[in-house]
Image: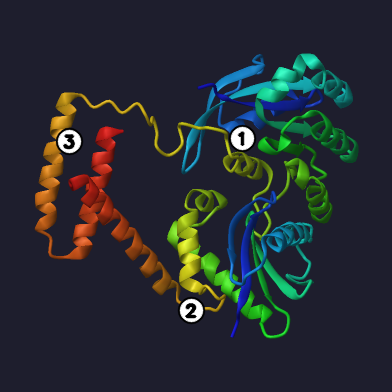
Amino acid sequence: MDNHKVLILLPESLEIQEHIAFISTIFQKQYDETESIARDVQWKTKYYETTLDLYIDTYDVLQEWVNDFVSDECKELRDVISGIIFVFKDEDHKPPVECLKNLIDERIEDFTAKFFIGCYFNENVIEEDELYELNSDLLVQNFEIVNWFDKPDPSMDKVGSERIKEIIDVHPWLSHPETLKKNQGQINISPIDLDSFMTKLEQAKERYQTFDDSKEAELFIEKIIDELSDMIV
Amino acid sequence: MSQIKYMLLTSRQGKTRLIRWYQPFDIKYKHKILREVTTNVLSRKSKMCNILEYQDHKVVYKKYASLYFIAGIDLDSDNELLTLEIIHRFVETMDRYFGNVCELDIIFNFSKAYSILDEMIMCDGSIIETSKDEVIHVVEAMDAIESNDDLDRVLS
């Protein structure tokens, strides 16, 4: 199974240390700035884990990059990526947002199955009300703008890198075999393992029947289920 | 007595995570409500009122982290503040069950979220249980029965 591919687009005006900090903060990966593809980046959540390949690109003039990206040569790339993280730091955030919105709208097929994050890497953050309005307009494109330098607010909203992580967490990755039932289909119990498994089962059955207290029995069941699952998975 | 018409749970990205209809609506109207109410609520700024009128009923919503809890209630007979309190109870109960509930918990355990909601709100939209302890107790009892079933299946 191929890794999921995420494209990260950074402006050339961003310092190299900022590139590294950005990628390391989100993906918890030691990123080497000479790499344009960071392979096998583990993405772990409470419920699943998956592996990503990060395609890292930079741009000087966004419109020029977009023109290249919409060309036929890049069709395969456009089709294969699961999501794009655009970083921009222009004082006026509207032109890049408009440019990226048009790109998603017009040139990315099946954009509803992908995620798009616009990360505004500027300390003069987009005001909350304006951000609300902007994001509500971009809802259809599955595109969300996030202020990198936003301070956490009392509404418990995740902001900055935490919000980017949250968007990636809840993305419905198409087919992820690593989800929940890890290594499903590869269960391979050797005869010796099966013997010990059956013995443990028998012992658990006998022990279970001796419990008078239902709470204690419940705890025992949970423990045994965990142990047995560990043996077979 | 509060009688909710529907309860929706929508993410900041406009994705519906839970839906419970407590009154019969035809499928076309359900889609219309989903589309219009969600768009309306998501476009509202954080300092705007949490209650709005929509067609023949009122919509009461509250945002918790990345999730919007939206309830449709009757225009005249229902109490908006009570509805907000019910939403808050629901969130607190899920918070206690999952331990700091997040969107991912609901995506991967939506049946549990539905069980919690069903323990609190009856199928006609009226409130049947307000005690968090009681709801958690019932849901945990269901979990224990499921675990017993699992073990029985393994042992048999």
Mark number, residue A197? 3
Spot occupied by residue A121 in the image (x, y as percentages of width and height): 77, 37
Tell me which residue sits at (82%, 35%) in the image.
A105
Image quadrant occupied by the C terminus of chain A: top left
Residue at label 2? B128
Spot occupied by residue B66 in the image (x, y as percentages of width and height): 64, 54
Q: What kind of residue is marked 1?
A: Ile
Q: What is the crowding at mark 3: few (fewer than 14 residues within 10 Å), some, or many (at least 20)?
A: some
Spot occupied by residue B8 in the image (x, y as percentages of width and height): 63, 62
Query: Which is nearer the eye, B4 or A118?
Result: B4
Query: Which is nearer the eye, A54 or B23?
Result: B23
Alpha-carbon span between mark 1 and mark 3: 41 Å
Both labels 2 and 1 in a single chain: no
Residue at label 1? A26
Alpha-carbon span between mark 2 and mark 1: 43 Å
Q: What is the crowding at mark 1: few (fewer than 14 residues within 10 Å), some, or many (at least 20)?
A: some
Both labels 3 and 2 in a single chain: no
